[in-house]
Amino acid sequence: MSANPAVVAELSIAVQFTVVTTLLVYFLLLRGMVRLEEVRVWSAAWFADAVALAAVLSSSVFGAAVLPLRLSLVLYLAGKTAFAVLMVMGARNHLRPGVAPPARPIPLALLVTVWSLGVAAIAPRLAIAQFAQSAMLCVVFAAGGWIVLRTPRSPVSRWLGISFLLLSVASLTYAVALAPALSARTATPSPMRFTSFADAWLELILALSCLAAVADRSEEQLRYANRELLESQERLSLMVDTDPLTGLANRRAMRPFMDRATASGAALIFIDINDFKAVNDRFGHSVGDAVLQRLARLLTETFRPQDAVMRYGGDEFLVIAPSFELARVQPRVERIRELMAEPTDEAPGIRLAAGVTELQPGGDPAAALVRADHLMYHDKQRRG
């Protein structure tokens, strides 16, 4: 006993409606969790598709008593048109977030209304309306596939373009099958009653492609957020470990430099400005700042790029020079003394006290710092 074709046709529509309704619910839930423009647009697209299928299913099951055939046709045309256009618009938002214009309800509603009412009014028979709708869907989905595949956001988004092309080919197939029925003497081909089975599969593939694109973009946003976080941490660390006045590393940044110097051995140079308080009291803090900046600049210029020059605190500076012989340090320190003793337009000449010691490879850095500090103190006392 063969199945009733009308029952099978209604079943195919019911299956497609169930699939689309399930996808609509999922995308609405996703919209609440993922704040992406394409998710919002695609949710509206699945709603429009559900409206179109609900109209067809209601008309098929209950007949004109519940929903007049012409109104059912208008809702179907409007829903399917909005579905296709919104899907492509959502794809554009996915490809160019923040650049592609957002979906505008009024122009879209006007386009859908004009198309659906126009086709429903002009087409004398259902087959002609189906042909026009299939041709329109073929063009819209083909355009969407071309847009996505021409400039894919990522390899994952190519699946979205392929899904559009599959729907375009299916719509073209329907239009070709319906072409003979445009004649008043030819009936609608029987296989066209069961296209909802194929459409359900194609729309499920489209939905999976949309979800893959959303997941890919969400992962991209997460990577971007992580990168921004790391850069922010680096900037914060730089701010914390850098003296804002001189631009040198401060005492907090000493540990890694000292660890490297301990492995290779280094010369440690402590430098202090004599009577720096008197400079501030006599000339003002702006002149005192200029003195500190000048000394920092001379230290950086005098020692090697691999040497760590830091403002240890207040008017004290520390230089950590890995693998640097003490015999080569003293001439540099004396040269800095001479230059700082000469007054400039910005600051008076000042005297420096210095303590130089050697940190042996594998030695105790804390003890070496104490020695350099003591030597600097004795130098300060000796020079008055």
Image (spheres, rainbow, N blue to C red):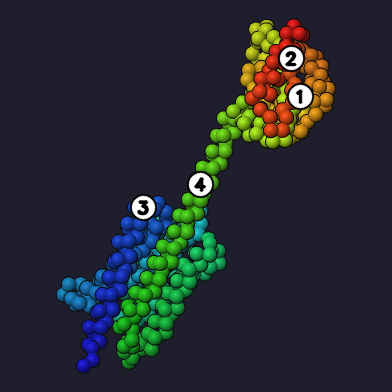
Tell me if I can see residue 249 in this picture.
Answer: no
The residue wearing badge 2 is 353
Residue 303 or residue 340, whichever sits in front: 303
Q: Neighbour class for label 4 at 10 Å: few (<14), some, many (≥20)?
A: few
Dots 4 and 2: beta carbons under 8 Å? no
Q: Which residue is mark 1?
A: 298
> What amino acid is at disc 4?
Asn
Q: Is residue 260 visible?
A: yes
Position in image of residue 114 (x %, y %): 36, 67
Q: Quadrant of residue 241?
A: top right
User: What amino acid type is highlighted by mark number 1?
Assistant: Leu
Q: Quadrant of residue 122?
A: bottom left
Q: Amino acid at mark 3?
A: Met
* Mark 1 residue crowding within 10 angstroms, few (<14) / some (14–19) / many (20+): some
SS for callout 3 = helix
The residue at which mark 4 appears reads as 226
Give the mark nearer the N terminus: 4 vs 2.
Answer: 4
Whether residue 240 sits left or right of residue 264 in the image: it is: left
Comparing labels 4 and 2, the label whose residue is closer to the camera? 2
- Residue drawn at (51%, 46%), measured in percent from left and top? 226
* Residue that carries the numbered disc 3 in the rendered image: 33
